[in-house]
Amino acid sequence: MERVSETLVSREEIEAAVTRLAKEISEDYKGKDLIVVGILKGAAVFLADLIRKIDCPMIMDFMQVSSYYNGTVSSGNVKIKKDLDYDISGKDVLIVEDIIDSGVTMQCLKRELFSRNPGSIRVVAAFDKPSRRTVDFKADYVGIEVPDKFIVGYGLDYAGKYRNLPDVCVLEVDGGDK
Ligand code: IMP
Ligand code: MG
């Protein structure tokens, strides 16, 4: 069984980070053709908070993806479970992700979306675990860096649970690390 242990990032720290990110994004996307793409399901909570603090015009869309990775940097592949409703060609795409871990999912997704000829693509992640990277990937905007621990809350889940926790907490699992 798993157990939610200590709070790693409080709701106040998260809110401060979201405010900072939204300010940067609002400045950077002034006059651009912004489409915000939330990655389901983990980014739903972050996206809802973030977009209400972004003060430039935008539209919102969602994708749901899972990555396959066979060990080489270039051959990661992304399986699209739910695709975009909008055509992104010529648009300035901002991918909103919950957390970057190995980096494989975002690297693959960026490659897929680049093939649709957008004006630009950037990634904003609420959380980042840089020590876990297996590919060379860097998000353009990062909320909070976290250590190599499995975390839940603020949209992040374990087996579908705990997304509703307002703080980000460390999860301890008996007989395994996830
Ligand atoms: P990556 O392809 O390894 O970067 O995978 C990132 C995805 O793994 C995120 O979108 C999350 O869904 C999931 N993930 C990574 N670390 C955690 C964690 O600590 N808690 C919950 N989900 C996580
Ligand atoms: Mg995810």
Image: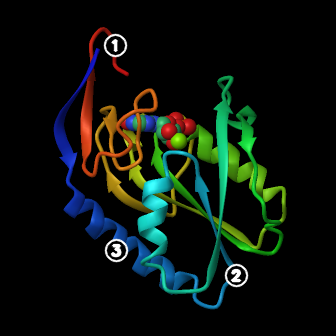
Q: From this viewpoint, is residue 133 visible?
A: no
Q: In screen coordinates, is 4 left or right of 53?
A: left
Q: Is residue 172 above or below residue 146?
A: above
x, y percentage for residue 21?
Answer: 40, 71
Q: Is residue 28 above or below residue 92?
A: below
Q: Can you tell which quarter of the image residue 170 is in? A: top left
Q: Is residue 149 above or below residue 164?
A: above
Helix, strand or loop at mark 1: loop
Tell me what residue is drawn at x 44 percent, y 69 percent. Answer: 50
Q: In screen coordinates, is 154 left or right of 100?
A: left
Residue pointed to by mark 1: 176
Query: How many C-alpha atoms fall within 10 Å of the one at disc 1: few (<14), some, or many (≥20)?
Result: few
* Mark 3–mark 1 distance (CA, rounded to whole Å): 35 Å
Query: Which circle marks residue 19 in the picture?
Result: 3
x, y percentage for residue 142?
Answer: 41, 60
Tell me what residue is drawn at x 27 percent, y 52 percent. Answer: 166
Quadrant containing the C terminus is top left
Tell me what residue is drawn at x 47 percent, y 45 percent. Answer: 100
Quadrant containing the N terminus is top left
Query: How many C-alpha atoms fall within 10 Å of the one at disc 3: few (<14), some, or many (≥20)?
Result: some
| Nearer to me, 133 or 128 | 128
Among the two numbered marks 3 and 2 on one chain, the one whose residue lies closer to the N terminus? 3
| Nearer to me, 137 or 145 | 145
| Nearer to me, 93 or 71 | 93
* Mark 3–mark 2 distance (CA, rounded to whole Å): 21 Å
Query: Which circle marks residue 116 in the picture?
Result: none
Query: Which circle marks residue 33 in the picture?
Result: 2
Helix, strand or loop at mark 2: loop
Among the two numbered marks 3 and 1 on one chain, the one whose residue lies closer to the N terminus? 3
Q: From this viewpoint, is residue 48 visible?
A: yes
